[in-house]
Image (tube, grey):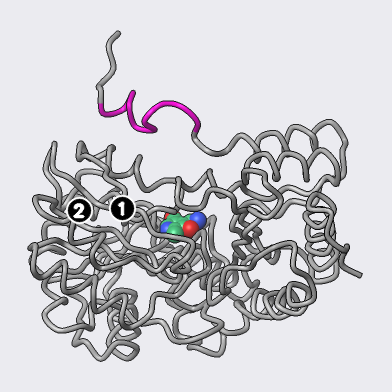
Amino acid sequence: MKLSHRITHLTGGGSDGWELFIKSRRMIAEGVDVTELTIGEHDTRTDPRILDAMNASARGGHTGYAMVPGTDALRDAVAARVAERTGVPTTRANVLITPGGQAGLFASHAATCDAGDTALYLDPYYATYPGTIRGVGAMARAVQTRAEDAFQPRKDDLEKAAPGARSLLINTPNNPTGIVYSRATLDGIAEVCRENDLWLISDEVYDTQVWEGTHLSPRALPDMAERTLVVGSMSKSFAMTGSRCGWIVGPEQAIAHLINLATHTTYGVPGFIQDAALWALRQGAAFEAEIAAPFRRRRELAMHILSGQQAVGPVPSQGAMYLMLDIRGTGMSGEAFANALLDRHHIAVMPGESFGQAAAGHVRVAMTIEDAAFAEALRTLCGFAAELQGAPVVP
Ligand code: PMP
Protein backbone atom coordinates (compact mmCIF):
# COMPACT_ATOMS: atom_id res chain seq x y z
CA MET A 1 0.00 0.00 0.00
CA LYS A 2 1.14 3.49 -0.76
CA LEU A 3 2.22 5.54 2.23
CA SER A 4 2.19 9.32 2.36
CA HIS A 5 5.03 11.31 0.85
CA ARG A 6 5.25 13.16 4.15
CA ILE A 7 6.12 9.99 6.06
CA THR A 8 8.29 8.25 3.48
CA HIS A 9 10.36 11.40 2.92
CA LEU A 10 10.63 12.42 6.56
CA THR A 11 14.37 11.86 6.83
CA GLY A 12 15.10 13.27 3.38
CA GLY A 13 16.87 10.08 2.23
CA GLY A 14 20.58 9.35 2.43
CA SER A 15 22.47 9.20 5.70
CA ASP A 16 20.60 9.97 8.91
CA GLY A 17 23.88 10.71 10.68
CA TRP A 18 23.62 7.87 13.19
CA GLU A 19 25.92 5.36 11.44
CA LEU A 20 28.78 5.82 13.87
CA PHE A 21 26.52 5.46 16.88
CA ILE A 22 25.07 2.26 15.42
CA LYS A 23 28.54 0.94 14.67
CA SER A 24 29.62 1.60 18.25
CA ARG A 25 26.51 -0.12 19.64
CA ARG A 26 27.25 -3.11 17.39
CA MET A 27 30.83 -3.30 18.72
CA ILE A 28 29.49 -3.18 22.29
CA ALA A 29 27.06 -6.02 21.51
CA GLU A 30 30.04 -8.01 20.22
CA GLY A 31 31.81 -7.50 23.56
CA VAL A 32 34.15 -4.59 22.73
CA ASP A 33 34.66 -2.14 25.61
CA VAL A 34 33.69 1.11 23.86
CA THR A 35 33.80 4.50 25.61
CA GLU A 36 30.63 6.14 24.36
CA LEU A 37 30.60 9.92 24.10
CA THR A 38 27.76 10.01 21.62
CA ILE A 39 24.24 10.61 22.86
CA GLY A 40 23.03 13.49 25.01
CA GLU A 41 21.85 11.73 28.08
CA HIS A 42 22.95 12.05 31.71
CA ASP A 43 25.03 9.28 33.26
CA THR A 44 22.92 9.78 36.40
CA ARG A 45 19.30 8.62 36.51
CA THR A 46 16.21 10.59 37.54
CA ASP A 47 16.57 11.71 41.19
CA PRO A 48 14.83 9.24 43.54
CA ARG A 49 12.92 12.14 45.14
CA ILE A 50 11.33 12.89 41.76
CA LEU A 51 10.44 9.20 41.49
CA ASP A 52 8.90 9.34 44.99
CA ALA A 53 6.68 12.21 43.85
CA MET A 54 5.76 10.24 40.72
CA ASN A 55 4.95 7.15 42.77
CA ALA A 56 2.88 9.08 45.33
CA SER A 57 0.88 10.71 42.55
CA ALA A 58 0.22 7.43 40.71
CA ARG A 59 -0.66 5.62 43.97
CA GLY A 60 -2.89 8.56 44.86
CA GLY A 61 -4.92 7.88 41.73
CA HIS A 62 -3.51 10.29 39.16
CA THR A 63 -3.43 7.55 36.51
CA GLY A 64 -6.48 8.50 34.48
CA TYR A 65 -6.67 10.94 31.59
CA ALA A 66 -5.04 14.17 32.64
CA MET A 67 -6.20 17.59 31.47
CA VAL A 68 -5.03 17.91 27.85
CA PRO A 69 -3.30 21.33 28.24
CA GLY A 70 -1.50 20.12 31.37
CA THR A 71 -2.47 20.33 35.02
CA ASP A 72 -3.20 23.85 36.25
CA ALA A 73 -0.46 23.52 38.86
CA LEU A 74 2.24 22.52 36.37
CA ARG A 75 1.21 25.16 33.83
CA ASP A 76 1.33 27.75 36.64
CA ALA A 77 4.77 26.54 37.72
CA VAL A 78 6.17 26.71 34.18
CA ALA A 79 4.61 30.17 33.69
CA ALA A 80 6.12 31.39 36.97
CA ARG A 81 9.56 30.01 36.07
CA VAL A 82 9.48 31.67 32.65
CA ALA A 83 8.15 34.99 34.01
CA GLU A 84 10.77 35.08 36.75
CA ARG A 85 13.68 34.27 34.44
CA THR A 86 12.71 36.42 31.46
CA GLY A 87 10.62 39.25 32.91
CA VAL A 88 7.91 38.55 30.32
CA PRO A 89 4.44 38.37 31.89
CA THR A 90 3.40 34.74 31.48
CA THR A 91 0.35 32.90 32.76
CA ARG A 92 -1.10 29.43 32.51
CA ALA A 93 -2.85 30.52 29.28
CA ASN A 94 0.58 30.89 27.66
CA VAL A 95 1.62 27.30 28.47
CA LEU A 96 0.91 23.90 26.93
CA ILE A 97 2.48 20.83 28.57
CA THR A 98 3.78 18.40 25.92
CA PRO A 99 5.22 14.88 25.92
CA GLY A 100 8.80 16.21 25.81
CA GLY A 101 10.52 18.93 23.85
CA GLN A 102 10.44 16.91 20.63
CA ALA A 103 6.64 16.83 20.61
CA GLY A 104 6.76 20.58 21.32
CA LEU A 105 8.97 21.15 18.28
CA PHE A 106 6.61 19.18 16.06
CA ALA A 107 3.49 20.92 17.40
CA SER A 108 5.14 24.35 17.08
CA HIS A 109 5.84 23.77 13.40
CA ALA A 110 2.37 22.32 12.86
CA ALA A 111 0.93 25.47 14.42
CA THR A 112 2.96 27.92 12.35
CA CYS A 113 3.55 26.31 8.94
CA ASP A 114 1.12 25.14 6.30
CA ALA A 115 2.00 22.42 3.81
CA GLY A 116 4.62 23.70 1.40
CA ASP A 117 5.65 26.67 3.57
CA THR A 118 9.36 27.21 4.13
CA ALA A 119 10.63 26.70 7.67
CA LEU A 120 14.19 27.80 8.38
CA TYR A 121 16.65 26.14 10.75
CA LEU A 122 20.33 26.64 11.40
CA ASP A 123 23.15 24.31 10.41
CA PRO A 124 24.70 22.62 12.43
CA TYR A 125 21.46 21.36 13.91
CA TYR A 126 20.02 18.84 16.30
CA ALA A 127 19.44 15.71 14.23
CA THR A 128 15.63 15.70 14.26
CA TYR A 129 15.10 19.27 13.05
CA PRO A 130 14.70 18.81 9.28
CA GLY A 131 12.56 15.68 9.75
CA THR A 132 10.34 17.47 12.25
CA ILE A 133 9.72 20.24 9.73
CA ARG A 134 9.07 17.79 6.89
CA GLY A 135 6.76 15.87 9.21
CA VAL A 136 4.29 18.76 9.21
CA GLY A 137 4.50 19.03 5.42
CA ALA A 138 6.68 22.15 5.37
CA MET A 139 9.90 22.66 3.41
CA ALA A 140 13.00 22.50 5.64
CA ARG A 141 15.61 25.04 4.62
CA ALA A 142 18.98 25.21 6.38
CA VAL A 143 20.85 28.46 6.93
CA GLN A 144 24.56 27.82 7.37
CA THR A 145 26.52 29.15 10.30
CA ARG A 146 30.30 29.16 10.20
CA ALA A 147 33.06 27.68 12.30
CA GLU A 148 34.98 30.98 11.99
CA ASP A 149 32.09 32.75 13.78
CA ALA A 150 32.00 30.02 16.45
CA PHE A 151 28.67 29.04 14.87
CA GLN A 152 26.87 32.22 15.93
CA PRO A 153 24.45 32.87 13.04
CA ARG A 154 25.05 35.97 10.92
CA LYS A 155 22.20 38.37 10.50
CA ASP A 156 22.88 38.88 6.78
CA ASP A 157 22.73 35.12 6.11
CA LEU A 158 19.33 35.05 7.83
CA GLU A 159 18.18 38.12 5.93
CA LYS A 160 18.94 36.39 2.63
CA ALA A 161 16.95 33.28 3.59
CA ALA A 162 14.02 34.94 5.34
CA PRO A 163 11.86 36.42 2.56
CA GLY A 164 8.84 34.18 2.02
CA ALA A 165 9.65 31.84 4.94
CA ARG A 166 7.13 31.28 7.77
CA SER A 167 9.34 30.35 10.69
CA LEU A 168 12.87 30.18 12.03
CA LEU A 169 13.97 27.50 14.48
CA ILE A 170 16.89 28.30 16.77
CA ASN A 171 18.52 26.47 19.68
CA THR A 172 20.51 28.12 22.45
CA PRO A 173 22.38 26.77 24.41
CA ASN A 174 23.12 24.80 21.27
CA ASN A 175 23.30 21.15 20.48
CA PRO A 176 25.69 20.17 18.86
CA THR A 177 28.06 23.16 19.18
CA GLY A 178 27.88 24.02 22.90
CA ILE A 179 27.53 27.69 21.89
CA VAL A 180 25.27 30.13 23.76
CA TYR A 181 23.91 32.82 21.44
CA SER A 182 25.08 36.30 22.32
CA ARG A 183 22.79 39.25 22.86
CA ALA A 184 23.93 40.67 19.50
CA THR A 185 23.12 37.41 17.71
CA LEU A 186 19.67 37.26 19.28
CA ASP A 187 18.98 40.94 18.54
CA GLY A 188 19.80 40.22 14.88
CA ILE A 189 17.57 37.15 14.84
CA ALA A 190 14.70 39.10 16.40
CA GLU A 191 15.07 41.89 13.87
CA VAL A 192 15.00 39.46 10.95
CA CYS A 193 11.87 37.82 12.40
CA ARG A 194 10.08 41.14 12.91
CA GLU A 195 11.05 42.48 9.48
CA ASN A 196 10.03 39.31 7.63
CA ASP A 197 7.02 38.45 9.77
CA LEU A 198 8.52 35.10 10.83
CA TRP A 199 7.53 32.96 13.75
CA LEU A 200 10.53 32.25 15.97
CA ILE A 201 10.60 28.75 17.43
CA SER A 202 13.14 28.89 20.24
CA ASP A 203 14.38 25.52 21.48
CA GLU A 204 15.62 26.22 25.02
CA VAL A 205 15.81 22.68 26.38
CA TYR A 206 19.39 23.29 27.62
CA ASP A 207 18.56 26.52 29.47
CA THR A 208 19.95 25.24 32.78
CA GLN A 209 23.30 24.24 31.27
CA VAL A 210 25.14 27.51 30.80
CA TRP A 211 28.85 27.58 31.64
CA GLU A 212 29.81 30.97 30.22
CA GLY A 213 27.72 34.09 29.61
CA THR A 214 23.97 34.01 30.21
CA HIS A 215 21.04 32.42 28.52
CA LEU A 216 18.75 35.01 27.02
CA SER A 217 15.31 33.90 25.86
CA PRO A 218 14.48 35.81 22.66
CA ARG A 219 10.83 35.91 23.74
CA ALA A 220 11.95 38.72 26.05
CA LEU A 221 13.20 40.93 23.20
CA PRO A 222 11.05 43.85 21.99
CA ASP A 223 7.82 42.75 20.26
CA MET A 224 8.95 39.12 20.19
CA ALA A 225 6.49 37.60 22.73
CA GLU A 226 3.73 37.79 20.09
CA ARG A 227 5.74 35.83 17.50
CA THR A 228 7.81 33.40 19.60
CA LEU A 229 7.08 29.85 20.67
CA VAL A 230 9.55 28.67 23.31
CA VAL A 231 10.10 24.92 23.60
CA GLY A 232 11.22 23.71 27.03
CA SER A 233 11.71 20.31 28.59
CA MET A 234 12.27 18.44 31.84
CA SER A 235 14.61 16.02 30.00
CA LYS A 236 17.96 17.80 30.24
CA SER A 237 17.34 20.09 33.21
CA PHE A 238 16.07 17.35 35.54
CA ALA A 239 17.52 14.15 34.03
CA MET A 240 13.98 13.08 33.12
CA THR A 241 14.59 12.08 29.49
CA GLY A 242 12.39 8.98 29.74
CA SER A 243 9.48 10.76 31.42
CA ARG A 244 8.58 12.68 28.26
CA CYS A 245 7.54 15.99 29.74
CA GLY A 246 8.10 19.41 28.21
CA TRP A 247 6.20 22.54 27.24
CA ILE A 248 5.51 25.24 24.71
CA VAL A 249 5.26 28.84 25.91
CA GLY A 250 3.72 31.31 23.50
CA PRO A 251 0.93 33.78 22.77
CA GLU A 252 -2.44 32.83 24.28
CA GLN A 253 -4.15 32.48 20.92
CA ALA A 254 -1.45 30.15 19.58
CA ILE A 255 -1.57 28.06 22.77
CA ALA A 256 -5.37 27.76 22.45
CA HIS A 257 -4.92 26.24 18.99
CA LEU A 258 -2.04 24.08 20.17
CA ILE A 259 -4.30 22.69 22.93
CA ASN A 260 -6.74 21.78 20.21
CA LEU A 261 -3.94 20.05 18.28
CA ALA A 262 -2.93 18.16 21.46
CA THR A 263 -6.53 16.95 21.86
CA HIS A 264 -6.25 15.42 18.40
CA THR A 265 -2.74 14.00 18.74
CA THR A 266 -1.17 13.29 22.15
CA TYR A 267 -4.17 13.73 24.44
CA GLY A 268 -1.86 15.16 27.05
CA VAL A 269 0.85 13.92 29.39
CA PRO A 270 0.27 11.39 32.21
CA GLY A 271 -0.80 13.08 35.45
CA PHE A 272 1.76 11.30 37.62
CA ILE A 273 4.57 12.46 35.29
CA GLN A 274 3.28 16.03 35.51
CA ASP A 275 3.11 15.83 39.32
CA ALA A 276 6.71 14.60 39.41
CA ALA A 277 7.73 17.47 37.11
CA LEU A 278 5.91 19.90 39.38
CA TRP A 279 7.77 18.59 42.43
CA ALA A 280 11.08 18.99 40.56
CA LEU A 281 10.33 22.53 39.34
CA ARG A 282 9.34 23.59 42.86
CA GLN A 283 12.84 22.75 44.14
CA GLY A 284 14.14 25.82 42.29
CA ALA A 285 17.41 26.74 40.62
CA ALA A 286 19.70 25.08 43.20
CA PHE A 287 18.32 21.67 42.31
CA GLU A 288 18.78 22.40 38.60
CA ALA A 289 22.38 23.45 39.28
CA GLU A 290 22.95 20.16 41.13
CA ILE A 291 21.81 18.19 38.08
CA ALA A 292 23.94 20.30 35.73
CA ALA A 293 27.02 20.08 38.02
CA PRO A 294 28.67 16.99 36.45
CA PHE A 295 28.69 18.65 33.02
CA ARG A 296 30.04 21.90 34.47
CA ARG A 297 32.85 19.97 36.17
CA ARG A 298 33.74 17.94 33.06
CA ARG A 299 33.71 21.05 30.92
CA GLU A 300 36.31 22.54 33.32
CA LEU A 301 38.37 19.37 33.04
CA ALA A 302 38.10 19.54 29.25
CA MET A 303 39.19 23.20 29.14
CA HIS A 304 42.28 22.25 31.12
CA ILE A 305 43.16 19.30 28.86
CA LEU A 306 42.49 21.22 25.65
CA SER A 307 44.56 24.23 26.72
CA GLY A 308 47.65 22.01 26.87
CA GLN A 309 47.61 20.90 23.23
CA GLN A 310 47.33 22.25 19.70
CA ALA A 311 46.13 19.27 17.67
CA VAL A 312 42.44 19.88 18.33
CA GLY A 313 40.80 23.30 18.12
CA PRO A 314 38.04 23.68 20.68
CA VAL A 315 34.93 25.64 19.76
CA PRO A 316 34.20 27.89 22.80
CA SER A 317 32.34 25.66 25.23
CA GLN A 318 29.62 27.86 26.71
CA GLY A 319 26.70 25.57 27.43
CA ALA A 320 24.89 22.24 26.97
CA MET A 321 26.40 18.83 27.63
CA TYR A 322 28.64 18.76 24.56
CA LEU A 323 32.04 19.87 23.35
CA MET A 324 32.56 20.57 19.67
CA LEU A 325 36.14 19.99 18.57
CA ASP A 326 37.75 21.16 15.35
CA ILE A 327 39.87 18.31 13.95
CA ARG A 328 40.50 19.85 10.52
CA GLY A 329 44.22 19.99 11.38
CA THR A 330 44.34 16.22 10.91
CA GLY A 331 43.27 16.62 7.29
CA MET A 332 40.38 14.25 7.95
CA SER A 333 36.64 14.71 7.83
CA GLY A 334 34.80 14.45 11.15
CA GLU A 335 33.38 11.18 9.91
CA ALA A 336 36.75 9.65 9.00
CA PHE A 337 38.28 10.83 12.28
CA ALA A 338 35.40 9.49 14.38
CA ASN A 339 35.57 6.13 12.61
CA ALA A 340 39.34 5.90 13.02
CA LEU A 341 39.08 6.85 16.72
CA LEU A 342 36.46 4.17 17.24
CA ASP A 343 38.44 1.49 15.38
CA ARG A 344 41.77 2.33 16.92
CA HIS A 345 40.90 3.47 20.47
CA HIS A 346 37.32 2.26 20.96
CA ILE A 347 36.12 5.79 21.70
CA ALA A 348 32.84 6.81 20.07
CA VAL A 349 32.17 10.49 19.29
CA MET A 350 29.72 11.96 16.80
CA PRO A 351 31.03 13.23 13.45
CA GLY A 352 30.20 16.91 12.93
CA GLU A 353 28.77 15.93 9.54
CA SER A 354 25.97 14.11 11.40
CA PHE A 355 24.63 17.57 12.25
CA GLY A 356 24.86 19.15 8.81
CA GLN A 357 27.47 20.71 6.56
CA ALA A 358 28.58 23.60 8.75
CA ALA A 359 30.24 21.34 11.33
CA ALA A 360 32.21 19.28 8.77
CA GLY A 361 35.72 18.58 10.04
CA HIS A 362 34.52 18.64 13.64
CA VAL A 363 33.43 16.03 16.15
CA ARG A 364 30.94 16.37 18.99
CA VAL A 365 31.91 14.92 22.33
CA ALA A 366 29.13 14.31 24.85
CA MET A 367 30.33 14.95 28.42
CA THR A 368 28.19 12.11 29.67
CA ILE A 369 30.53 9.68 31.41
CA GLU A 370 32.26 9.71 34.76
CA ASP A 371 34.98 12.38 35.15
CA ALA A 372 38.17 10.27 35.14
CA ALA A 373 37.08 8.15 32.17
CA PHE A 374 35.95 11.29 30.35
CA ALA A 375 39.31 13.00 30.90
CA GLU A 376 41.20 9.91 29.77
CA ALA A 377 39.10 9.58 26.61
CA LEU A 378 39.60 13.26 25.77
CA ARG A 379 43.37 12.96 26.28
CA THR A 380 43.40 9.92 24.01
CA LEU A 381 41.40 11.79 21.37
CA CYS A 382 43.82 14.74 21.46
CA GLY A 383 46.81 12.40 21.36
CA PHE A 384 45.35 10.60 18.35
CA ALA A 385 44.76 13.90 16.53
CA ALA A 386 48.33 14.97 17.32
CA GLU A 387 49.69 11.67 16.04
CA LEU A 388 47.77 12.09 12.79
CA GLN A 389 49.32 15.53 12.36
CA GLY A 390 52.79 14.45 13.39
CA ALA A 391 52.51 17.01 16.21
CA PRO A 392 53.83 16.47 19.76
CA VAL A 393 51.51 14.18 21.71
CA VAL A 394 49.73 15.53 24.80
CA PRO A 395 51.46 14.46 28.00
N1 PMP B 1 16.09 19.85 21.31
C1 PMP B 1 17.39 19.55 21.41
C2 PMP B 1 18.38 20.56 20.95
C3 PMP B 1 17.80 18.32 21.93
O1 PMP B 1 19.11 18.05 22.03
C4 PMP B 1 16.81 17.40 22.35
C5 PMP B 1 17.18 16.03 22.89
N2 PMP B 1 18.41 15.54 22.62
C6 PMP B 1 15.48 17.77 22.21
C7 PMP B 1 15.13 18.99 21.71
C8 PMP B 1 14.33 16.85 22.60
O2 PMP B 1 14.36 16.55 23.93
P1 PMP B 1 13.11 15.94 24.70
O3 PMP B 1 12.10 15.52 23.69
O4 PMP B 1 13.64 14.78 25.48
O5 PMP B 1 12.63 17.04 25.56
Q: Which residue: 45% across, 64% down? A: 272
Quadrant in which residue 321 is drawn: bottom right
Q: Which residue: 23% across, 55% down? A: 108
Q: Is residue 263 above or below residue 233?
A: above
Q: Residues within 10 Å of mark 2 (few under 14, many from 20)?
A: some
Where residue 322 appears, as percent x and y from the top left, is: 60, 64
Q: In which quadrant of the rendered image does the C terminus lie?
A: bottom right
Residue 161: give its label. Answer: 2
Q: Which residue: 63% across, 68% down? A: 314
- Indicate yes or no whether the magenta region holds residue 13: yes
Where residue 233 appears, as percent x and y from the top left, is: 42, 66
**Amino acid on which the number 1 mark rests in the picture:** Val
198 relative to 26 in the view: left or right: left
Q: Is residue 253 above or below residue 258?
A: below
Quadrant in which residue 337 is drawn: top right
**Amino acid on which the number 2 mark rests in the picture:** Ala
Q: Looking at the image, in which quadrant does ligand 1 appear?
A: bottom left
Nearest the viewer among 89 and 301 is 301
Contact (CB < 8 A) between labels 1 and 2? yes
